[in-house]
Amino acid sequence: MTLVHVTHEAVRKIGGIGAVIQGLLTSKEYLKAVKRTILVGPLFEADLPPADKLGGGEVLYSLLDGVDKGYRDILRPIEEKYLTRIVYGKRRFEDRREGVSVEAEVILIDPNAVDPDRENFFKANLYKLFGLQSDRYEDLDEFETYMRIAEPGYEAVRALLSRDDLPCVILSHEFMGMPLAMKAIMEGEKGFKTVFYAHEVATVRPIVENHIGHDTMFYNAMERAMEEGKYLEDVFGDQSGFFKHALITRSPRCDNIFAVGDYVVKELRFLGPEFSSVNIDLVYNGVPAYEISLEEKLRSKRKLQRYAENLLGFKPDFIFTHVTRMVPSKGLWRDLKVLKHLDPMFEREGRTGVIFFLSTLIGVGRSPEEVLRMEEEYGWPVNHRVGYPDLVGYEADFYVGVEEFNRGSKAIKAVYVNQFGWDRERCGRRMPEDMEFMDIRIGTDVEFGQSIYEPFGIAQVEPLSFGAICVVSNVCGCVGFLRKASGGEDVPNFIVADYTKLPGDRRSLEEILSIGLKERDEIEMRNSLEVAERIFRSLPRDEREMERMIERGYEIGSRMSWDVVVRDYLVPGLGRALRG
C-alpha cells in the first residue's frame, strides 16, 4: 500500500500536522503497514538551494536547479502540460530515541506557474461534480495555492507509481489536500482511494475563538442544537463565504474521514446532514512515550530550578510550564486563574513555585544578540517592554496578565519567555549552560494546556511519560484517548478542567448563545478552583511519589504511542477506505 500525504508541511514541520506526519512515519507499525510514502505540497521557496527545497533532503529531479537523476521522462511531460515546475526527491525522518530512520518521497508543485485554461477547466468540473464555486475564493492565495497543485500533483503521483505500489490512498490533511482528493475522485481510477484527515474543523475554530463565550458557549450550544435537530449554519449563520468551509464540506465524497478527537467527530456531524450518514473514524494523535529514570527527571528539574533562582532569587519547590503557540485558542489566561487559587495553598504549606510560559508570535524567535541586549538593559525575560524585539501583538496583552498575577502572588511567580527555543544561546546568560529543550519537558512538575479549542493537543501531554501532571481542558481530543488508554480509571498525572460545565438549570439554545465575558469569567474562576485543588493534592511531595508518577505516566503514555495509533486506529481506518 502507498500513502500520499497532501500537506503544507511536506518539507518542514511547522505545526501540528508536521508533528503527526513525523510521528506516523517513524512508527514501526506504520513501516510494517505502508510500503511507500509520498508527501505532496506546494513549492513555497523556489529560489532556495536544491537540498534546502526539500528541508535538507536529496533532490532527484528539479529543472529549476538543473538536477535530473533519471526522472525527466516521467515528470517533464506533466510540467509541460500544466506549465508548472516540479521538484521531486526524498526527505529523511528520524526518531533517534527509538532508533528509527526512514526516507519518504516528496513532490513539490510550484503554485505560481500554471496554465490558466487548464486551471479554469478544472474548476468548472469541480463545480459540476461537487458544487464548488471556486470563483468566490479566487482572490485568496491560500485557496489558489492548493487548487493549482491538485492536477499536476495527482498526475505526478500516478506517473511515479507502478502497479505493484497499488492500492494508493490519498490523505488530504485538512482543507489543503481536498482539491487533489477531488481530482482523484473525479478520475475514478481503480486502485486509488481518498481520505479526509480532519486535524480540526476549520469552520468551528473561528466561531469558538471569536465569540466572547468561547468553548463555554459553543459546546453547550452544539449539544443543545443537535438535540433539536439543528446544524451549525442553523445556529451560526451561512458559512459558505469561508473557503475552508467550502472545501471541507466536500469531504463526505471521500472514501473515509479521519478525526483526531472525539469532539472533532461531533463538530463534523454538526456541519450538516451530509455528515450524518458517512463513516468517520477516530484516529487519535500519538503521544511520545520515553522511559526515564528518577535521576534524569531530577537532573532536568534542577536546571529549571537553577534558572528560576537566577531570574527571581529563590529556588522553587515546584516547576510549572506551558509550552505552546501564542494564540488565543490556547487559553493561557486560564493558567493564571488556576495559579491564583493555588498560590494561597502553597503559602499555607510553605511551598513555592514558578511557572515558565514558553510562547511567541515570532516563528524563528529573537536573535541571540537581541536577547542579550534585552537581558542587560531591563532584565528580560522577567521584565518586558512593548515593541520588537520584545513584546509584539498578543504577547503584550498576555504579559499584562502575567504582571497582574505577579503583583498579587506570594508563593508562585510567573516568567514569560517569549522566545523560540530553550537553551542559553536563545534565552540569555542566566539560563544554565547545559540547558536543553528536553529539560523543560522532562523537568516540569505540571504542564498546562487548558485550550478553548484543541482538536487533540500533543504538546499538552508530551511530558506525561516524564511523570508530569498534565492539565488540559475537557474539549481537548487527547482526553478521549487517555480515557480509552486508562480503561476509564482515574490517572493522577492527568487533570481535566471542564470550563463548559454550566451552573443552574437546563438552558435554552438562545440563553446559551448569550453567554458573555461576565458569565464565562465566573465559570472559569469557579471551575479553576477545582483544578487548583486537584493539582495541590496530586503534586508529589517526595522522590518516592515522584518515581511513582514517572512509572504511571510512562505506563499510560505507552498505551497512547504512535505505534498504538497506527495499529488500532489508522490501519483499520485505511482498510475501511479501501473497501469503500
Image (tube, grey):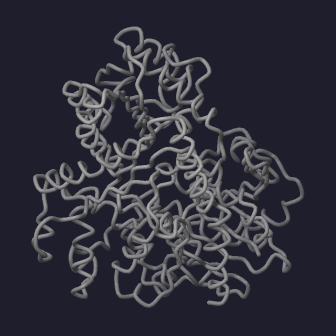
Measuring from the top left, give residue 517's x and y in whole percent: 14, 53
Number of numbered tags placed on the structure image:
0
**Residue 523 in the figure: left or right of residue 402:** left
Nearer to me, 402 or 485: 485
Q: Quadrant of residue 210?
A: bottom left
Q: Position of residue 173 (x, y in %)?
A: 55, 65
Q: Residue at x 55, y 62 (%)?
A: 285
- Image spot of residue 487 (x, y percent): 51, 70
Rendering quarter of residue 190: bottom right
* Vertical order, 419 against 484 (above or below): above
Is residue 111 in sight in this rendering? no
**Image-based side of 329 in relation to 566, left or right:** left
Q: Quadrant of residue 158?
A: bottom right
Q: Out of 579 and 46, give the one closest to the viewer.
A: 579
> For the C terminus, which image quadrant?
bottom right
181 sits to left or right of 205: right
